[in-house]
Amino acid sequence: MIERIFRRHGSLAQLMRLGWRRLPLGIATKQRIRHVLLKTLSSGYRVISSDSEQSAFQPSVRFTSDAGFFAPQVTVVVPNYNHAPYLRQRLDSIYGQTYPNFQVLLLDDCSTDDSRSILEEYAEKYSHRTTMIFNQQNSGGVFRQWLRAIQFAETELIWIAESDDYCDLNFLTTLVPFFMDEAVKLAYSHSVFVTEQGKPALFRFEDYVGELSTVKWRQTYVAAAHAEVVDFLGRKNTIPNVSSAVFRKFDPAFLLAESDWLEMKICGDWIFYLHAARGGKIAYTVDVHNYYRFHANNSSVKTYATPVYYREHECVAIEIARLYRVPVETLAAHKYFVKQFFDQNAFELRSLGIEFEALYDDERIREAAGKRLPNIMMASFAFASGGGEIFPIRLANALTQRGYAVTFFDFRGEPTNFLVREMLKPDIPVIELTNRFLDVDSMIDSFGIDIIHSHHASVDQFFAVSLLGQRRSNVTQVVTLHGMYDDMQRDIFDRTLKDVYPAVSRWVYISDKNLIPFKQRNLYREERFINIPNGMSAPNIQAVQRSAFGIEDNAFVVCVASRAIPEKGWREAIKVIREARSLSGVDIQLLLLGDGVLYETLKAEAVPAFVHLLGFVKEAVNYYAAADVGMLLTTFGGESFPLTIIECLMAGRPVIASDIGEIRDMLTNEKDMIAGYLVDISDGKIPIEATAYQVVELATNPIVRSAKQTLAKERSSCFDLGRVVDLYASAYRYPIATEVCLMS
């Protein structure tokens, strides 16, 4: 049954995007699916960073056995320009793949040979899986075609299969299983260098990479991309042909903003790999072959005597320095390999008045290193509902868009809610804690982590203990206080802080109340604490239809979105709405959104007809938009800066909420006008009748309701995530520039 489900729905990532609640599966079945994948991921391989630590992972074996259900769709891109003599062999090697789940995008950059008729022939033959895009004018560069393909592709995995190469028919069958590991961002195969006639070339892939290692590429491996760049890919382009690689689709905005990638002729593929793999892992296999055709049109030998060769390699060094925390040795080795070619062509280049230093400037590389953004490990308790779990996802997404390398760490403190997992951008690599004895120190080094940003006391402690034990000075730990420490018993707080406090460089508090336990124990130091509010990006609101729940358009709708625990006031909300209906005679309906023990309990009870139990939803803002008012009757001790209130305000709806944490300030403007109503919980209880009258006021007085809605829209602008990210960038700031001292 499990295999049948995966064949139908594809990869774990695709299941997450679909959302497990949308699938007709029982809870036990869903947990079994997760168990099988976790077992597959944790048992097969490990991160390596040196020749002495080669991996024994055999993905093709696992793929045909217990992982046979893993079949995410792949977009195969064929960018062609005047390669008619090679197209049939290329296309036969694609359409004949043993892996079944792929679509083909045929691109032609205004060829002048017979290419288009061949492409059209194959497109007609395989019309069910083929799309053609033909340029009417030549774009001027192959990387413009790559960019077009990335923008067009709707799948998570992409394979750019260049039109003059070819491959084994089990190419995708062998490479795709590596992506079961959600940290793998790029997987590539062994390349066989062939002549124009398809015969093995005298110069082999093994000869090309042999300057770096004579043993590394003899067997399959998986490595952290950062470690790979430090030891190999930062020194020489060890992926000599893009046809050998499958990668996760990523946002190329940062690549385009900071480099001349689109105009490059020689090193654009190398720079592309540096961006595509950043923050995650790279996989390599010897079990399948890509055949890379050498001919006069793609030989780089003729470029060795041209300035552009050295300028583009300087661009590569600049990208390495600004993207990765590499040691001096990496950039020195890169320069050494480049200068070798200059020295071999020095007479011709110097006859033109060109010196190496003018083309490859150490100072420009140093400047790039000084601008490097920190590599961040965003460490979350779980992919579960709750502000402390959802906010790090939103922050990780926003930081990635700003150009940060973000690796997401899932502590797996709770079972995964696939709808929450779906909130994380698919190109952000995820590391799951599958072993409580994980070598954190090795992981930090392999991924080049500068900052660990944790959001839950258990996760804070997990990393702090390791950092203290290893006495790390090159890694900063940042903790956001979501209210958990406020609600701790004194003895638990003291035990936790004994480990955590010495390791944490910056404490981010979202509410003044977060500071109380620290001040009580004389642990508050102004320089170590910074106030940053919560926020979210402006949503694309698509209000759900009330009719979907059997609610009339003229009904007054109240929406509650929170974790379904007793302290969040779900039962009190039901009592309030029952009382408000009685007082007003108005049809008042209650939407309850969220998961948890209380949700399961209420489902088993006979709740009133006006109560709609909807479970967890990914976009609560769309439900708030369908309602007239939001409600949060919380007595939760850790309540600080609720994300659900921000979502309600973003939908332009007022909120009836407990006066706790920062809620008063969240709802109140500079004129002390409140975008809703505050509920007095000074005695620790929700005043049912008083709160019911607040609901009645909004339900029966359209003037008051309209004024409160206007205030809600006004207040929503205060929680822009862009401003929040600016503040976190300030909190992260510390000396991280790579020391660059290159060979002379």
Image: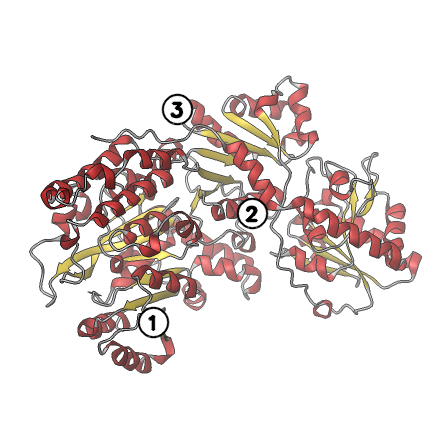
Residue 135 visible in the displayed image: yes
Label 1–label 2 contact, CB within 8 A = no
Q: Which mark is residue 314?
A: none
Secondary structure of the residue carrying numbered label 2? helix
Secondary structure of the residue carrying numbered label 1? loop
Q: Amino acid at mark 1?
A: Gln
Residue 500 or 391: which is nearer the viewer?
391
Real-space CA distance between mark 1 and mark 2, rounded to the nearest whole angstrom? 41 Å
State which quarter of the image contains the N terminus: bottom left
Chain-order first, disc 1 or disc 2: 1
Residue annotated with mark 1? 137
Work out which residue is located at the far top of the displayed protein and give it.
522
Real-space CA distance between mark 1 and mark 3, rounded to the nearest whole angstrom? 58 Å
Real-space CA distance between mark 2 and mark 3, rounded to the nearest whole angstrom? 31 Å
Q: Residues within 10 Å of mark 1 (few under 14, many from 20)?
A: few
State which quarter of the image contains the C terminus: top left
